[in-house]
Image: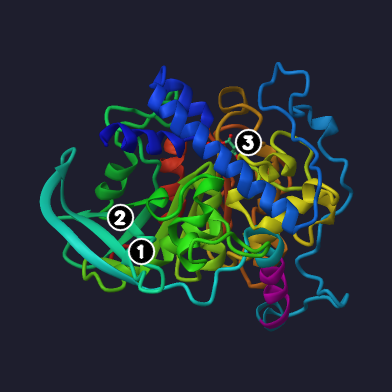
Amino acid sequence: MKRLLVSSLLLSLPVSLLAQFGPRTPEQDSLMARQQRKTQADHQAMMAQLNIKELRPGPSGNPKAPNAANADESKASPYTSLPDPLVLKNGNKVKSAKDWWQKRRPEIVEDFDREVYGRMPANVPGVRWEVVSTKDTMDGSYPIKLKKLIGHVDNATYPAINVDIDLTLATPATATGQVPVMMEFIFKFPAGFRMPQPPTSSTAPVALTWQQQLLKKGWGYALLVPTSYQADNGAGLTEGIIGLVNKGGRRKPDDWGALRAWAWGASRALDYFETDKDVDARQVGIEGLSRYGKAAVVAMAYEPRFAIGFIGSSGEGGVKLHRRLYGEQVENVASSAEYHWMAGNFIKYAGPLTPNDLPVDSHELVALCAPRPVFISSGSPDVEGRWLDAKGMFLGGVYAGPVYELLGKKGLGTTEYPAQEVAVDSGEIAYRQHSGGHTTVPNWPAFLQYADRYMKVK
Ligand code: GCU
């Protein structure tokens, strides 16, 4: 049983991290093989629904492979234009905030819903939050009140699927009122596993963990486990919250994918915070790395109650422009390894359609967060690799700028790509590339300095 649990955790990890667990047991191997077959079958079934016979394969993430992803900036821009966030489908220009909120934003949301991330069903069942335990303890030298929570999803319509959301909340025990909270989408690792630590940045040494940096300011933190309510693979699409709503059946092409489902869970956590007297629910931010960086920006875009977003190395499917021939491509995300993050319809853009046919691009996802602050974080291409496309993420921020400006705020304020460890943070959209690897850790001090402008302990 314990082995099986570890195996299912292993299955939810990025392949790059899996390698670090060493050899797998035959039991784990066969579980993985079974899960891969189930994923393949679901991917095929979605292709059949879409009437697609074949997809263009994506490039390889291995820089030495013959079909390696492009890492040459001079070849990165074969696309000559992006959808304009401030032009309506009928060709008229968006001239006022009212036009944005009433006309253009709903158009963009509809396109992301239908073609990119999928629609959240209207009949998602409710969640009952249970405080499993409350404990006074320490995080380093900081006294905290630690709450373990479970969000029980009402499964009366389909009892065969049980969904429980795993959430942890820590607030400073010394707090005299409600505090701002940053919530992270966390990777759940088997016991004993440690995330490899990145080399520390030369100018911003980090002595405290990110949680302790928050506690030091009098803020709290929350840890949300996305895979507790939606698995990180295609096989899991008939289970979890997506499977529960579909009563164990397959998705339709415009049904939500895992990113949207993970973001739904973050909104439900926010519902809980609104009832917790230790949390200032109007000052809750969302953070995540990589696939959870994608989830964090999707949560920010769709949930107006999130006050701030810290979007770590989100890459393709996150804030990196789809119309960029650099690093990971639309074709990779459309493959059976990653399509579960997205709406089934997204697969179409890997054949017969192309990324250029997408009705929206990622700058418009950032624009959906406007006017709220969004900090775009990346690692060093030399350490993190070029797959994530640090510049593509910067550009996703750049082209969202006009929407922020229309709403009386400031975007990045420059189109010039900054040097490593230089924060571009004079506006509501911020960007910083740290000198470490695939992590947000070295960017926490810069994020918090920027976040201080928006979040306050009262
Ligand atoms: C893969 C994937 C990325 C993703 C990353 C991760 O590299 O291609 O899109 O962001 O895994 O989540 O670690």
Q: Quadrant of residue 413?
A: bottom right
| Between marks 3 and 1 in the image, the one whose residue lies nearer the viewer | 1
Q: Quadrant of ligand 1?
A: top right
Distance (Cα) linking label 3 and label 1: 28 Å
Quick one: label 3 or label 2, which is nearer the N terminus? 2
Q: Residue at x 69, y 45 (%)?
A: 334
Quick one: label 3 or label 1, which is nearer the N terminus? 1
Residue 442 showing in the rendered view: no
Task: Answer whether residue 105 is magenta in the image.
Answer: yes
Residue placed under numbered mark 1 in the picture:
269
Q: Quadrant of residue 457?
A: bottom left
Residue placed under numbered mark 3 in the picture:
388
**Label 2 environment density (alpha carbons within 10 Å; few <14, some 14–19, many ≥20):** many
Q: From the Cβ of disc 3, is ligand 1 less than 8 Å away?
A: yes
Residue nearer the viewer, 279 or 296: 296
The residues colored magenta run 102-111
Q: Is residue 292 above or below residue 64?
A: below
User: Do tag 1 and tag 2 residues touch (Cβ < 8 Å)?
Assistant: yes
Residue nearer the viewer, 86 or 446: 86
Question: Residue flagged by tag 3: what amino acid is it?
Answer: Leu
Question: Residue flagged by tag 1: what amino acid is it?
Answer: Ala
Residue placed under numbered mark 2 in the picture:
167
Distance (Cα) linking label 1 and label 2: 7 Å
